[in-house]
Amino acid sequence: SSELTQPPSVSVSPGQTASIPCSGDKLGDKYASWYQQKPGQSPLLVIYQDTKRPSGIPERFSGSNSGNTATLTISGTQAMDEADYYCQASDSSTEVVFGGGTKLTVL
Amino acid sequence: QVQLVQSGAEVKKPGASVKVSCKASGYTFTSYDINWVRQTTGQGLEWMGWMSPHSGNTGYAQKFQGRVTMTRNTSTTTAYMELSSLRSEDTAVYYCARDSGFCTNGVCFNWFDPWGQGTLVTVSS
């Protein structure tokens, strides 16, 4: 199955914009999803079908996907957004793949 | 509300099997596939496979082929994941998750919402 690559960590100041990239071969031809996971909790879907937000997810979360890179963007980042973030897609063999995860630090 | 509630923590010896349950409520159980994902301590998410509660059809990640079995009981709206020949590397939190995506022309687009609370499986002699 194909791989998805994320940076291990991203830091952002409160109120600033955080961008978390996820790269994979022809990722733009697939749908990317993003999950937020806080310590001791289950993953929470924050973006699906590249750009859509589930009900209850704040508008400051947005997504894009083109070429080989999908990006999760958090505008006006808050302390509560500090968490691990995982991208996910399905590859051509219908196996599901997750990225290695990115720890977002708000400092 | 849509909810997946998993069974409690397990401790198993190497070579044994474990069966984790996932009870669904708040939606039509047979309308959405259930996927299983595991997470080892401090590590990322690893997809194990899917099961259709409607048909019972399954698809497993190559890594787990021959060791994992996913089943369901539609009368109790419960999905099960059984992993055999356990080894220490299988120590992890196991999650079930509802697949809210779709397949078209043989290509599937998956996203998982919601997730169960997770079940810690510890493999130790």
Image: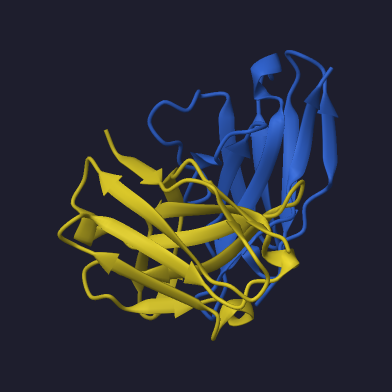
Q: Position of residue A5 (x, y in %)?
A: 77, 58
Lateral position of residue B93 relative to residue B51, left or right: right
* The C terminus of chain B lies in quadrant: bottom right
Q: Which chain is blue?
A: A
Q: Which color scheme is applied?
A: by chain
Residue occupying image coordinates x 39% and y 80%: B106
Query: How many numbered dots are placed on residues in this image?
Result: 0
Lateral position of residue B105 relative to residue A23, left or right: left
Decide which of B58, B104 is in the foreground and name it.
B58
Q: Position of residue B117 (x, y in %)?
A: 48, 40
* The N terminus of chain B lies in quadrant: top left
Lateral position of residue A68 relative to residue A55, left or right: right
Q: Residue furthest left?
A: B75
Quarter of the figure with residue A78: top right
Lateral position of residue B23 relative to residue A76, left or right: left
Decide which of B20, A27 is in the foreground and name it.
B20
Identify the colour of chain B in the image: yellow
Q: Position of residue B78 (x, y in %)?
A: 28, 56
Decide which of A54, B74 is in the foreground and name it.
B74
Residue occupying image coordinates x 72% and y 60%: B124
Q: Residue furthest front?
A: B125
Is A77 above or below relative to B8?
Answer: above
Q: Position of residue B36 (x, y in %)?
A: 49, 61
Is B43 above or below relative to B51?
Answer: above
> Is residue A78 visible from the viewing direction of this image?
no
> Is residue B2 visible from the viewing direction of this image?
yes
Is A37 above or below relative to A7?
Answer: above
Residue occupying image coordinates x 70% and y 54%: B40
Quarter of the figure with residue B3: top left
